[in-house]
Each structure stands twice: as structure tokens, then as C-alpha cells.
Image (tube, rainbow, N blue to C red):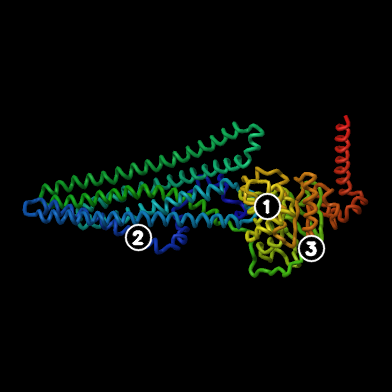
Amino acid sequence: MSSEANPPADTAASTGRRTSPKALLALLPTVARYKGRLIAALAALTLAAAATLVVPVAVRLMIDDGFSAQSTGNVNRYFGAMILVVAVLALASGARYYLVNTLGERVVADLRAAVFKHLSGLDASFFDSARIGELLSRLTADTTQLKAAFGASASVALRNFFMFVGAVALMVYTSPKLSAFVLIAIPIIVLPLYAAGRAVKTRSRAAQDTLAEASAYAAENLGAVRVMQAFGAEAATNARFAAAVESSYDAARLAVLARGVVTTIAIFLAFASVVVVLWLGAHDVLAGRMTGGLLSQFVLYAVLGAGALGELSQVWNEISAAAGAAGRIGELLAVKPKIVAPQPVAVLPSPPRGAIRFDHVDFTYPSRPDAPALRDLSFTVAPGETVAIVGPSGAGKSTIFQLLLRFYDPVSGRIELDGVDIKTADPAELRRRISLVPQEPVIFATSFADNIRYGEPEASEAAVEAAAKKAAAQDFIAATSQGYETKIGERGVTLSGGERQRLAIARAILRQSPVLLLDEATSALDAASEGLVQHALEELKHGRTTLVIAHRLATVLSADRILVLDAGRIVEEGTHQSLVAKDGLYAKLARMQFETGAQALSGAQDAAAE
């Protein structure tokens, strides 16, 4: 498979991969949408930094000019000015905190929406090998990591960058000689931080990948909790998840250890340089080469600069971790869907007719390149015709539906709807003309009404109820506490198999598409419900082109034609009577089913008689 088909969710390949902080630059267009808020935040940052940098000047003036009997007025003015500076600092800091953090929240909200939209547009081959739990980890945990980078971390980084630059500039202005010693120390501090930051990035990436692996395992098993409990697999599952969590903890611990070491080194070097400078300055004061106030001003600037540099080292660690998250999200966004609308797009005819044609179609699933699913398949379906597709498991029946819905493109050959090659049409417009009732219906954790109108969100209540009645779902819906507004459990776990199937049929009835695909649509129904639904489906088929996949041959006896598939090829075609008369594969399947059913009925009657 190509890189486009393989999802980047493969943690085995990505664990430990180095990610440059440049990965964060790819997110800047999202930030740029909010220029006004960004400019206001920068203005608040600048004002807060400037107010902080004024404090050492006031301290120098008080030390050199304020402590005398004649300077009481000056002291009062200096302290009054200090209160004003503190007020400005407080207001600017509060504004900075609000603006930057809300900007981070806004950016991450937009990013999550963009990632989900991107995922929903990827083709089926991506999800054949992707792990949903790991994708959810990227959508939640990784974006949360980015929220810190674009929110609090960005605020701290910008504030300390301004403080550092301003403090260094004013240090040089205050004492070029002492500043020279400080500036010499800066490379000694920064270079180890840069080198150690690479280790932090690698370990942070490993921690994020192992967390995603644990999340994927949890999602998979919680989604099948009844199966897990039915097989008594709780202990083994818990042990495996605990091992995955422990692995995630170990990776996170190593990442935190790396950050701690970097922070320790940075703070020690930064403040040790301040101590050395203070020692040198003290000798200059004793020698009369500078005043005590001037030394105090310089030391305060040195402390502010050192503190800012220490804070920047911690922020660098957080940015390194966020770069890993950004890299993972960037890899996901870089996956391009293979099934897209071509340019120019072919327009499907209106009104639709529902004519279907497969012309020498060959297809192999990307995940199984050595096992062709369809081989030189050709058939046509006239508008309004009902065609059943039967055959043994693995014959390629469901693959026909997958290709007609254009979840995949054939390796060779051509598929047409109303005379238009579906590869040249817009996939969204194509799918609007098709209603699907799958063998395993998907039910969402919303209300009955929302589940029925899933494909037609603007449908009225009357239309929803009419579709439910035709699908024989009205009675069990009305029996619930809130009727159509009753919330269903996730995946419809509170419903029987037949009830889930009838909801899926109601959904297809409401859609009113010209092409209807029924994949074992009545397989989960009891005899009474099957009769009701079959009657509804017969009405639904009028004026629609219908393809029916069935293992139970009794459900396709009324089809206009039956296609018999074996190993991806059509081996027989005709009506039920003509195919039985041929005594081929279909006749063999029919004998197996009907004789088995007769034997079962006879056995039940004998048991009842006894």
C-alpha cells in the first residue's frame, strides 16, 4: 500500500520519531484567523513587560536619591509612581492571560473540528487499517497538548522573551562591563538547553504514542464489553490494559525526567551567573566605580533576565512536547483521500432513473492484495428492476455494494449509474441517490427520530413517523417513555437485533433514493416482523432499482433476476425456477437450505409430539 493508504496511526512506525518545533508553524494559519485578538495580546504583553522593566529604575532612584531627610517628597513620589506601575502591570497581565488563553482555546477548537472533518472525508481504505481509539487520542489528547502550547505556554514564552530582551538591553545600558560577563554566560546556558531539548522531544513523542496505543486498546475493548464479559476475559483484558498504561507512564516519566534535568541545569546556570555578576559589582561599589543604586538596578535586571531565561527553558520543553503532538496531527492531516470529486465533475442526470452497469470490473482490497474480490464482473440492472445477489461467503457480494457506493474504485473496468461513470461524478451526489440497509445496522446514541432522519436531517416529524410505520417500527418506539424522542443506548445496545434492523430500514425508506441496496435486510427479524417488513420493502421497491444480497434464498424468490457469484465471478443468472432447473451452484445452495429447514421443522414437530 502507498503512504496515502497507510494511516499514520501506526505507532510502531512513529514511536520515537523526532519532530521539529517547526511542526507548530503549520498551525499558524489557524492562529492568523484571529489577528485582532493576537495583536491585542501582544500589546498587553508589551505593556506588562515594560511596566516590569521600569521597577529597577525606581529602585535605583530611591536608593541613590531617596534615603535622606531632604528627600521625603521624592520618596512619596517614587512610591506613588510604583503603585501606578503595579496597577498597569496587573491590568496588562490580566488582559494578556485572558487574550492568549482564549486564543489557545479557540485555535484548538478550530483544529479539532478540522481534524474531525478531515477524518470524515477519508476513504474506506484508510479505516481498513486505522485504529479508531488512536485516532480519538489524536483528536483529544494531542490537541489538548497543543492548547497548552498556544495558550499558557505561548503567553509565558512571549512574556519572558520580551522580559529577557528588555532586561539584557537595559543591563547593557546600565553597565556595559558587567553585561559582558552576563552575555558570555548566555551561550553556556542556551547550548545545553538546545541539545537537551532534542531528548525531550523524542521522549515526549514516545509518551504520546504509547498513550494513544493504550487509548486505542481501551476503546476497542469497551466497545465490546459484553463479549469480554461473556467470555470471562476481564482479568486478561485488565492486565493487558494495565501493562499498556504502565508503558505509557514509563515513557511519560522519562519525558518528565528529561524536562526536569534541563530545567535544573538552566536555573542553576542562570542564577549562578547572577551571583558572579553581583560579586563583581560589589567590588566596583567598594572601589567607587558605581553607586549602590546602580548596582541594585543592574542586579534586578540580571535577575529578571535570568528568571526569564529559566522560564523560557521550561516553555521550550513544553513546546518540544507540543511539537510532537503537532507532528502527529500533521501526519494525519497529510493523508489525502483517494475517493474525491474529479475536476471537472460529471453531472448525474435528473430526474434519476437508477440504471446500473458493471463493465468488466476487477477489484482487490488494498489490505489483501493477493486475494482478488471481483474478477471481470459484468452485469446490468434496469431502472426499477429487483436483482438478488447470492453465493457462498467470500464470493464478492458485499464488495459490489462497496464499489457502487464508491468506497473504493475498481482496479480495472467501469461502473455506471444512469450512464455516467461513477468515478467522474461527485461521490456525495452519487451516494445521495443510494439508500443502504446493511446487515449489521449502525444505531447512534441519539433519539429514535434522529436515528431515522440520519440521512435526511431536515425531514419532518410526520415523515419520520410514516417511515417508521412502513418499517414496522412504530409499535416498539411508541411503547417507550418518550416515544420518538427516547434516547437509545450507544450502538443501540438496548434494542433487539430486529428492532435495530427495522430502524435501519426506516432510515432507508425516509431517504427515498432511486437505488436501494439491501444487505440481508431481514436477517435479524422474527417471523412476524419479517412479514411486516417484507411487505414494507415490497412497497418501497416500486419505482426503485433494488439490489438484494441474501444468504437466505427464501427472501429472494420474488426477485426479477438472481445473480449467482462464486470467487468474484457471475457463474449463473436467472430466476429461482430457471436456476433450480439448471442444477448448478444455486440449486445446490437451495437444496442445502430448504432441506435443512425442512429437517429442522420435522424435528421440532416430532419433539412437540413427544
3 or 2: tag closer to the N-terminus: 2
Residue 343: x %, y % from top left: 63, 68
Q: Secondary structure at mark 1?
A: loop
1 vs 3, front mark: 3
Q: Residue at x 39, y 43 (%)?
A: 259
Q: Which residue is mark 2?
A: 42
Type of amino acid at the residue the image marks with label 2 = Leu
Residue 593: x %, y % from top left: 85, 43
The answer for how far apart the CA atoms under marks 1 and 3 are is 36 Å
Q: Residue at x 20, y 46 (%)?
A: 278
Judge the density around disc 3: few (<14), some (14-19), many (≥20) Cα neighbours within 10 Å: some
Q: Secondary structure at mark 3?
A: loop
Q: Secondary structure at mark 2?
A: helix
Position of 377 compared to 447: left or right?
right
Of residues 608 and 380, the one nearer the viewer is: 608
Judge the density around disc 1: few (<14), some (14-19), many (≥20) Cα neighbours within 10 Å: some
- Disc 3 + disc 2, Cβ < 8 Å: no
Q: Residue furthest top?
A: 610
